[in-house]
Amino acid sequence: MQVSRRGWLKNAGVACFGAASGGLTASLCGASTPPAAGAPPLPWPYVKLDGEAVAAAAYEMHYKAGCCYAVSASIINELAKKVGAPYTSWPTALMTYGGAGVAGVGSLCGGLNAAAMVTFMVAGSDDKAKQSKAQEITRDIFNWYSQTALPDFRPAQPKFETVKIVSRTNLCHISVTKWCKASKCKISSKEREERCACLSGSVARHTVELLNAHLAGGFKAMHPLSEETQSCRKCHDRGSALENARAQQDCGVCHFTKTPHPKL
């Protein structure tokens, strides 16, 4: 059945009147409503944290929901206690997605994933200068992880004593496999779980140390890329002759491990 223009306007008026009585005027009659208060813009406020306390919390939280959750929740929960909002509304369970290299895929270490998120939360924004500083801090955390014998956190009552390794990578798959070879333990072993719990403590503590330094205005990157990697970047990075690789991590972990580099 066709409706005339007059009939449509009449019906629309009734709809608006009825919606107004039900509190829905804005959605049906086009009136604007003030937006709900959302999260404040980045960076969120940060205060100095106790790295040892955060590390101990991350170790325990790892056994609850994995590395990405442990590192992020250990820091955010402390900020929620000391700062309050907006940290009190952050859903820490969200970060379980990053466990074991993102949903068990074995890519980026979940602890590092969380460290980057927290760093950008308290030091980054859409402002280019703040982005650059947050990126610098994040890269230094990643390089520290790749170049340092870890885990270097030991809980008060460890379930096992764990072997330390220098992973030379930020990837879960390679880091865990190297540790399993060094320790002669299986991926499914309780010893491996303890290693990753201790590693969550290490990453959480180091992240807090750098964020504390940033807060005090004294952050300085301490872990540059290796000379070998910088040499690779001269040919493969942006602005180079080949310009065909985008990475800031140890090249030798994956490339030319068994075959020599082609002659230049």
Image: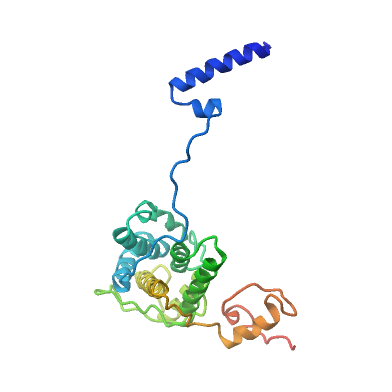
**Lateral position of residue 124 relative to residue 93, left or right:** right
Q: Against 164, is 246 above or below?
A: above
Viewer-closest of 147 and 161:
147
Say which residue appears at 46% left-offset and 57% top-offset: 97
The residue at the point 73 percent across, 86 percent down is 262
Q: How is the image coloured?
A: rainbow
Q: Quadrant of residue 67?
A: bottom left
> Could you say which quadrant of the image residue 207 lies in?
bottom left
Residue 171, x across and y down, in percent: 51, 71
Q: Which residue is at a point 30% across and 75% down the rendered structure image?
A: 160
Does residue 107 appear in the picture of this structure?
no
In x, y percent, where is residue 153? 34, 77
Q: In this rendering, is residue 134 above or below 219?
A: above
In this image, 165 relative to 224: left or right? left
Task: Determine the image quadrant of residue 161.
Answer: bottom left
Q: Position of residue 256 (x, y in %)?
A: 64, 82
**Residue sitting farthest toward the left:** 157
Task: Tell me the quadrant of the picture where the N terminus can be found.
Answer: top right
> Of residues 27 and 34, which is closer to you in this image?
34
In the image, residue 201 lies at what x, y percent?
35, 71
**In the foreground, 89 or 54:** 89
Where is the C terminus found, in terms of image quarters? bottom right
Q: Is residue 211 left or right of residue 249?
A: left
